Image (cartoon, rainbow, N blue to C red):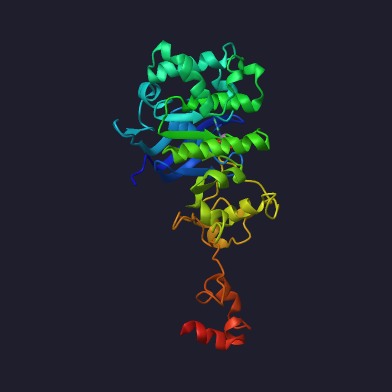
Amino acid sequence: MTALLSVRDLSVRFTVRRARSWHRVAAVTDVTFDLAPGECLALVGESGCGKSVLASALLGLLPANAATAGTALLTTTGADGVDLLSAGERVLAERVRGRRVGLIPQSPAGHLTPVRTIRSQLAETIRELTGRPRAELGAAVPAAAERAAFPADHLDRHPHELSGGLAQRAATALALVADAPLLLADEPTTGLDRDLVERTVTELRRQVDDGHALLLITHDLAAAELVADRVAVMYAGRIVELTDAASFFGSPGPRHPYARRLLNALPTRAFTPIPGMPPELDALPSGCAFAPRCTAATSVCATDLPPLENGTACHHPHTPILNLATDSPIRGEHTESAQGSTGPSSEHPEKNDALSS
Ligand SMILES: Nc1ncnc2c1ncn2[C@@H]1O[C@H](COP(=O)(O)OP(=O)(O)OP(=O)(O)O)[C@@H](O)[C@H]1O
Ligand code: NI
């Protein structure tokens, strides 16, 4: 399937003044991925790794002290392709945001007008984005609310009269109004209780199954597992792992040591926090940014940046140890440790014979 969104070598740099000198903050670096209709890519990683900055870049919503490089081609049926990074503000405002890219925001407060009811905000957005006549709005508003599971009996409330979860749903309903082919959801489950997380996740998956492409930005890996088809793990502004959700969350699991530790930090898994802190983005090392926290790191990791190959950017990716009884002989890291010692091959020559036949 052709990509709806094709991002190539996207980088974002901020220029900031700190302690009387100028610094360049490398918030996003060389990010490349494709996203197809009917597919959800979850972008995960610790706080500050560049997820929201990436989303802002795609929407043309970066602040004035940001500079971008790379391309992000959005190709929707019935319209010309547009490079989201080089398109001007007018094109983005009139033809892209809301219409071709729907944003489900991290903090709904900024997307809702405090002095107006949800009904009136939905009506205005529907009129503006879809051009439906006033007479049809009476029915269109509850339908739009329903799509984000926003209760119809709360439509006449103002944003401050809603719980955080319901405000989130109101913002989601606004984002879904124009049926945009690409949806960007930034932490859509943050601050919601378990029940609402489940409903939000179900709704997002329904949007994907309806044919929307969804870029789901989250540090809620449990939510990502429920919605995503593929997972991209970001660390210090770069994608370090990009893989199928099934193999990421299931077997054989992530290959990048950071991605493995991120999963193991989950309360439902080993619940082991990752020691240390991510690096400062204005003073990144020349090699792998995770190396100082990585137990697998060697001297090459400190000096050479590992390229993203076969879905992993690591000099020492995890190699699954295969089951002797059912699979091919053990390779990679395990072979080394078995060399010259009483490894499986010297202990069980008969088993090895059986495997090689
Ligand atoms: N306007 C700005 N000027 C300078 N640096 C910025 C600016 N906006 C963001 N940054 C930096 O860019 C980095 C990435 O921030 P971003 O908000 O994308 O993180 P995130 O992965 O979304 O984290 P979280 O999970 O906390 O939302 C951070 O280090 C942040 O300090
Ligand atoms: Ni964020």
Horizontal side, residue 158 vs residue 89: left or right? right
Residue occupying the point 45% across, 15% down: 137
**Residue 345: x and y, percent?**
57, 84
The spot of residue 83 in percent (x, y) is: 35, 34
Quadrant observed for ligand 1 in the rendered image: top right
Q: Position of residue 293 (x, y in %)?
A: 63, 54
How many badges with numbers are in the image?
A: 0
> Front-most of 180 and 263?
180
Task: Please say if 303 is above or below 322.
Answer: above
Q: Is residue 179 above or below residue 281?
A: above
Q: Residue at 59% across / 53% down in the picture?
A: 258
Query: Where 267 sits versus 314, above or below?
Result: above
User: Does residue 244 appear left or right of residue 85 in this picture?
Assistant: right
Identify the residue shown where x is 45% and y is 41%: 209
| Residue ranking furthest to the front | 139
Res. 52 visible in picture: no
Whole-percent x and y of residue 302?
Answer: 55, 56
